[in-house]
């Protein structure tokens, strides 16, 4: 039996929430367990529901009485520390490369543009990829990131250490690998994400394969 992927949505436009719900309604393995418009309500949402993936708009109001943008870059590391099994997918109109990179450093597992209709139409498939531990981006975002990292493909010693562990223990979860390194689960996932970008891949298996091709990890 396929395990259900539980999803929560943080988005301040009801029509967009409805659109996501419409895209996911036929996915028997995905359940939307809750939604909120405001940043200050995110933690309460996660406390109330068991959530695997949080769909998060990059610009949401702080509360019903405070419409100032909520600081999601501060929020995300805190959430991932409190909920180490949580994945975060950003869906936004903002496409500035620097901001996208900051969200990845904060722990996002994907970044979609709201006008990337192909990805939005395939939202269920995107969520399945992220739940499996892969990264996913809109094509234009991915191309930006690849250009940014093309000149710096060599892994840092810490990233190589993580990929070496992945190669040695291919069946272990990221949580189990984090224990081996004695780091937070979110820290290990961030190290993997940065390694993926440097290698131009989106998954653990592909990263290990590419590192072997580059002679960074031995067979």
Image (cartoon, grey):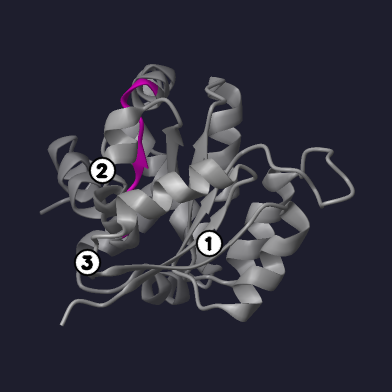
Cα distance between the residues tagged 2 and 3: 33 Å
Specify whether 179 is left or right of 142. Answer: right
The image's mark for residue 168 is: 3
Q: Position of residue 15 (x, y in %)?
A: 52, 42
Dot label at residue 15: none
> From the viewer's perspective, is the residue at label 1 or at label 3 nearer?
1
- Quadrant of the image occupied by residue 12: top right
Give the image location of residue 78, x and y in percent. 69, 61
What is the C-alpha distance between the residues marked 1 and 3?
20 Å
Find disc 1 in the rendering and name its residue.
186
Which mark is first along the chain, 3 or 2?
2
The quarter in which the N terminus is drawn is: bottom left
> Where residue 108 appears, x then y in whole percent?
50, 48
Instruction: Pick out the residue farthest to the right.
Output: 65
Residue drawn at x 61%, y 38% is 58
Name the residue carrying label 2.
122
Neighbor class of circle 3 (other Cα within 10 Å; few <14, some 14-19, many 20+) is few
Q: Which quadrant would residue 120 be assigned to in this image?
A: top left
Is 105 within the magenta? no
Number of callouts in the render?
A: 3
Disc 1 + disc 3, Cβ < 8 Å: no
Residue 177 is at least partly visible in this image: yes
- Report the mark closest to the observer, 2 or 1: 2
Give whichever of 11, 130 is nearer the camera.
Answer: 11
Crowd tier of the residue under label 1, counting other residues whose Cα lies within 10 Å: few below 14, some 14–19, many 20 or above:
many
Q: Which residue does the image show at 34% across and 20% down from the upper left?
A: 143
Q: Which residues are magenta?
A: 133-140
User: In which quadrant of the rendered image does the C terminus lie?
Assistant: bottom left
Any magenta on residue 135?
yes
Q: Position of residue 81 (x, y in %)?
A: 62, 67
Residue reaching furthest to the bottom: 1
């Amino acid at each position: 039996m396929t395990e259900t992927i539980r999803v929560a949505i943080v988005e301040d436009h009801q029509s967009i929430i409805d659109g996501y719900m419409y895209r996911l309604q036929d996915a028997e393995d995905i359940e939307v367990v809750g939604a909120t418009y405001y940043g200050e309500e995110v933690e309460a949402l996660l406390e109330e529901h068991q959530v695997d993936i949080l769909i998060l708009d990059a610009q949401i109001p702080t509360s019903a009485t405070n419409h100032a943008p909520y600081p999601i870059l501060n929020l995300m590391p805190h959430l991932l520390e409190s909920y180490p099994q949580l994945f975060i997918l950003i869906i936004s109109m903002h496409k500035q490369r620097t901001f996208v990179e900051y969200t990845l450093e904060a722990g996002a597992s994907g970044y979609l543009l709201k006008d990337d209709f192909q990805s939005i139409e395939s939202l269920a498939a995107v969520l399945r990829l992220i739940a499996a531990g892969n990264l996913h981006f809109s094509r234009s975002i991915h191309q930006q990131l690849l250009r940014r990292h093309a000149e710096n493909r060599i892994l840092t010693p810490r990233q190589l250490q993580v990929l070496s562990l992945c190669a040695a223990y291919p069946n272990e979860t990221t949580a189990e690998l984090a224990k081996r390194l004695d780091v937070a689960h979110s820290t290990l996932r961030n190290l993997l994400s940065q390694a993926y970008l440097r290698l131009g891949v989106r998954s653990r298996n592909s990263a290990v394969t590419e590192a072997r091709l580059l002679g960074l990890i031995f067979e």
